[in-house]
Image (cartoon, grey):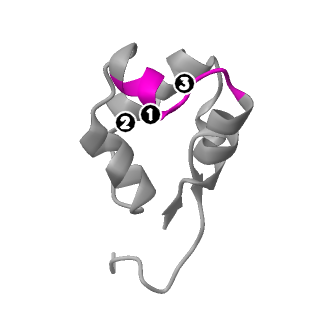
Amino acid sequence: MIDYSPFWKTLEKSKENWYSLTKEHHISFNTLSRIKNKKDITTKTINDFCRIFKCEVKDIIKYIPSNKDQKL
């Protein structure tokens, strides 16, 4: 399972907020809603966040093993 808690911590530490992400960086409201609701986002979006926050992927997402993951 992908966990977005690092994203929220990174956002909190930054000068950015929900408004600036949508208006200045053109991150869609839908994308932010997907993160809030623990839905999938694209690697392009992860890349965009890394560029915006000048951070690494680990500062946006982390993997947590879960029994709810799809079977491989």
* Residue assigned mark 3: 50
Magenta span includes 19: yes
The kind of residue on which mark 2 rests is Thr
The kind of residue on which mark 3 rests is Cys
Proximity of marks 2 and 1: CB atoms separated by less than 8 Å = yes
Residue 58, image x and y in percent?
Answer: 65, 41
Check the image and name the residue furthest to the front. Answer: 19
At 48% across and 86% down in the image, what residue appears? 67
* Left or right: residue 5 compared with residue 34: right
* Residue assigned mark 1: 46
At 27% across and 32% down in the image, what residue appears? 28
Query: What is the spatial separation of the Cα atoms under label 1 and label 3, in whole angstroms?
Result: 6 Å
* Residue assigned mark 2: 43
Nearest to the observer: residue 10 or residue 3:
10
At 58% across and 23% down in the image, what residue appears? 16
Check the image and name the residue furthest to the right. Answer: 13
Residue 33, image x and y in percent?
Answer: 34, 51
Query: What is the spatial separation of the Cα atoms under label 2 and label 1, in whole angstroms?
Result: 5 Å
Residue 41, image x and y in percent?
Answer: 33, 46
Check the image and name the residue furthest to the bottom. Answer: 67
Q: Is residue 13 above or below residue 40?
A: above
Stretch in magenta = 14-22
> Circle 2 sits in a helix, a strand or a loop, which is it?
helix
The kind of residue on which mark 1 rests is Ile
